[in-house]
Image (tube, rainbow, N blue to C red):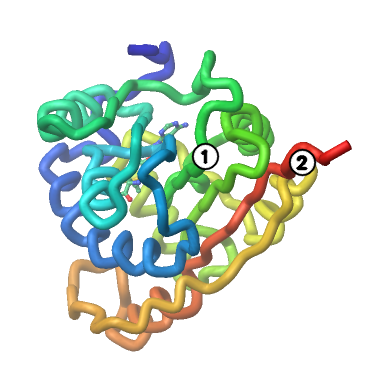
Amino acid sequence: MNDSPLSIPTWYRDPHAEQAMAEGHAPIWRHLLSLVPEHELSGVKVLDFGCNQGGFLRLLHQIRPFREGLGVDIARQSVEHANRLKGNLPIGYQTDTRLTGYENHFDIAFSHEVIYLIEDIAQHAADMLRVLKPGGVYYAVTGCHTDNPLWPQWRERVAEQTHTVVQDRALDDYARIFSAAGFQVSARRLGFSGFVPYEPDGWMPNIAAAIDYYWHTKTVFRLVKPPVPVS
Ligand SMILES: C[S@@+](CC[C@H](N)C(=O)[O-])C[C@H]1O[C@@H](n2cnc3c(N)ncnc32)[C@H](O)[C@@H]1O
């Protein structure tokens, strides 16, 4: 356990909201995985950065079993919950933000709706480059950016309801910063074409906005650590 001095208890101030978040994210995680061309993971080490209660890696192992998984999060109690739920799966969960000691360790990494909460994104990009093997891939997904028309309202809600500080960045800021860190950067729309539930809970002003968000606004960055050149 690499306990960060900067840790928080849970991400949501209301800890019960975290289970609901995982249930809401599960169809999106499934869709995200359908976009990922890395199919054969049986020999692979996977990282989930900002894992919360760990559901993404449990789902990934069910769909594409991997050799070893690590989920890290700044939220201590969420990580403890993830560890209680993992059973015999080859997954560790720990409170961590910097991944010290994992140099050139992971083949593939994910973060789903986390990068907009990280204050020093250039440091995060450098950390992710360091912990990936050469040729390794980092999928960083977010719809929480200043190109999102709903962002002015959402940023207030996130700030009120969670223990983290919200960052205002455009998609281009991420592209530029990850590129400057040394990643080969590409991106796509999430393009979620499934049925989007009608949830009048205040996040989406109407169902059309919800459909557009999951189809168009939410973005998947594919960040590749350059392979070692063959001499
Ligand atoms: C919106 S939640 C997403 C959780 C999960 N990835 C999912 O898809 O449901 C954002 C998560 O990122 C975590 N987080 C925020 N800043 C972090 C940081 N600097 N290092 C690690 N985790 C962080 C939060 O504690 C929270 O669990």
> Mark 1 or mark 2: which comes first in sequence?
1
Which residue does the image show at 39% across and 64% down from the upper left?
A: 32
Q: Marks 1 and 2, how far apart in space? A: 16 Å
Q: Which residue has dot 2 on it?
A: 182
Name the spot of residue 219 as percent of width and height, x first: 52, 66
The image quadrant where one finds the N terminus is: top left
Q: Amino acid at mark 1?
A: Asp
Name the spot of residue 78 as percent of width and height, x first: 22, 31
On screen, residue 213 versus residue 86, left or right, reads: right
Name the spot of residue 71 as percent of width and height, x first: 34, 33
Element on which disc 1 rests = strand
Q: Which residue has dot 1 on it?
A: 107
- Residue 120 is tagged as none
On screen, residue 149 versus residue 29, left or right, reads: right
Q: Amino acid at mark 2?
A: Gly
Residue sitting nearer the eye, 58 or 170: 58
Which residue does the image show at 52% across and 62% down from the upper left?
A: 220
Check mark 1 vs ligand 1: CB closer than 8 Å? yes or no.
no
The image quadrant where one finds the C terminus is: top right
Eye-nearest disc, 1 or 2 = 1
